[in-house]
């Protein structure tokens, strides 16, 4: 990773924080997006401590808002001469249905549209820096989920897990379609299941969902374990040629039938483009 620039979201805690620190140790310069300025500065200072003098930088944005995601994406594209890796990792689960200022359901906005919008903003810079990689955090939670294109944002019969599981299915479909659209550019796109991780994930979900997570985390792996496949996909020569794949524990895994539906992937892409306009 010497001399490479990595752009990351969800980098101030959990698996994202572990991943960017380890990639910095390996030689990368880290550019990350965070919502909270204090947490951003703490992460930047940690990166500087382990890998000084590389110009690690933080950008502040609310990735649940398309306008803010586009703003910060355009800023990064304009300020970075090259981007070798984009890590889409920010995400959350919410016990009640929340709507952003732009009128989108929060889980859909943060877990899917942020990936879609940011990647679109940085696409040309990634292609110009090829070989390059896009790594997106999905989840085994997608198994059993199915997108309802008449109700993508769970306006009918909302539940936290339904919205979350659908968003993780969307991450895999997005990756498959992105890989097709990047064919011939020497930019790869892959996604992964990090495992059930003992991190801050779920702490701000609210309601019974937040109360459930402390129990779930008793059986979870460490953030370092969860970050391992992100680091592998971002850096390993062994992963350089794979594209459009879903990984777990550094291995290609077969996602659900719904996640292998290329017609659904293309339809989700078209609908996401319309929403992002």
Image (spheres, grey):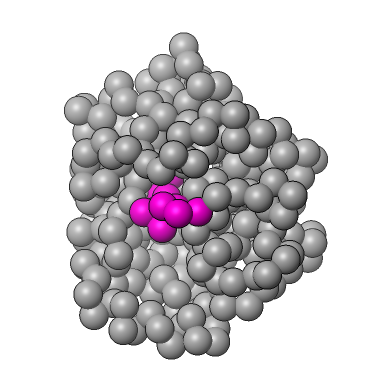
The answer to whether 26 appears left or right of 265 in the picture is left
Q: Residue 143, relative to residue 208: is it above or below?
A: above
At 59% across and 29% down in the image, what residue appears? 263
Q: Residue 212, relative to residue 245: is it above or below?
A: below
At 65% across and 50% down in the image, what residue appears? 148
At 73% across and 64% down in the image, what residue appears? 155
The residue positioned farthest toward the top in the image shown? 184
Coordinates of residue 209 in the picture (x, y in percent):
48, 81
The answer to whether 237 appears left or right of 183 in the picture is left
The answer to whether 26 appears left or right of 152 in the picture is left
- Can residue 97 be seen from the camera position used here? yes
Coordinates of residue 172 in the picture (x, y in percent):
47, 41
Coordinates of residue 185 in the picture (x, y in percent):
47, 15
Provide the residue span drawn in magenta.
133-145
- Looking at the rendered image, the quarter that the C terminus falls into is top right
Q: Residue 95, relative to residue 131: is it above or below?
A: below
Whether residue 135 is in magenta: the answer is: yes
Pick whichever, 41 or 260, lies toward us.
260
Pick whichever, 200 or 180, lies toward us.
180
Pick whichever, 235 or 217, lies toward us.
217
């Amino acid at each position: 990773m010497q001399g490479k620039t990595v752009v990351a979201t969800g980098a101030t805690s959990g698996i994202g924080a572990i991943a960017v620190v380890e990639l910095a140790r390996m030689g990368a310069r880290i550019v990350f997006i965070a919502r909270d300025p204090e947490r951003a500065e703490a992460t930047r200072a940690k990166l500087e401590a382990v890998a000084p003098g590389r110009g690690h930088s933080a950008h502040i944005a609310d990735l649940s808002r398309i306008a803010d995601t586009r703003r910060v994406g355009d800023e990064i594209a304009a300020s970075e001469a090259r981007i070798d890796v984009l890590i889409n990792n920010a995400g959350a689960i919410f016990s009640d249905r929340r709507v952003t200022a732009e009128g989108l359901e929060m889980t859909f906005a943060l877990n899917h549209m942020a990936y879609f919008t940011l990647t679109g903003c940085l696409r040309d810079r990634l292609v110009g820096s090829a070989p390059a990689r896009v790594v997106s955090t999905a989840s085994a939670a997608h198994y059993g989920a199915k997108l309802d294109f008449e109700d993508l944002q769970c306006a009918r019969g909302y539940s936290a897990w339904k919205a979350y599981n659908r968003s993780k299915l969307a991450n895999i479909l997005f990756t498959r379609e992105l890989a097709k659209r990047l064919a011939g550019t020497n930019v790869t796109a892959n996604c992964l299941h990090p495992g059930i991780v003992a991190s801050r994930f779920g702490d701000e979900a609210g309601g019974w969902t937040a109360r459930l997570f402390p129990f779930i985390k008793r059986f979870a792996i460490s953030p370092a374990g969860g970050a391992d496949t992100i680091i592998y996909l971002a850096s390993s020569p062994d992963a350089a040629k794979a594209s459009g794949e879903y990984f777990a524990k550094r291995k290609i895994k077969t996602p659900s039938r719904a996640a292998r539906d290329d017609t659904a992937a293309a339809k989700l892409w078209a609908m996401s483009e319309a929403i992002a306009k």
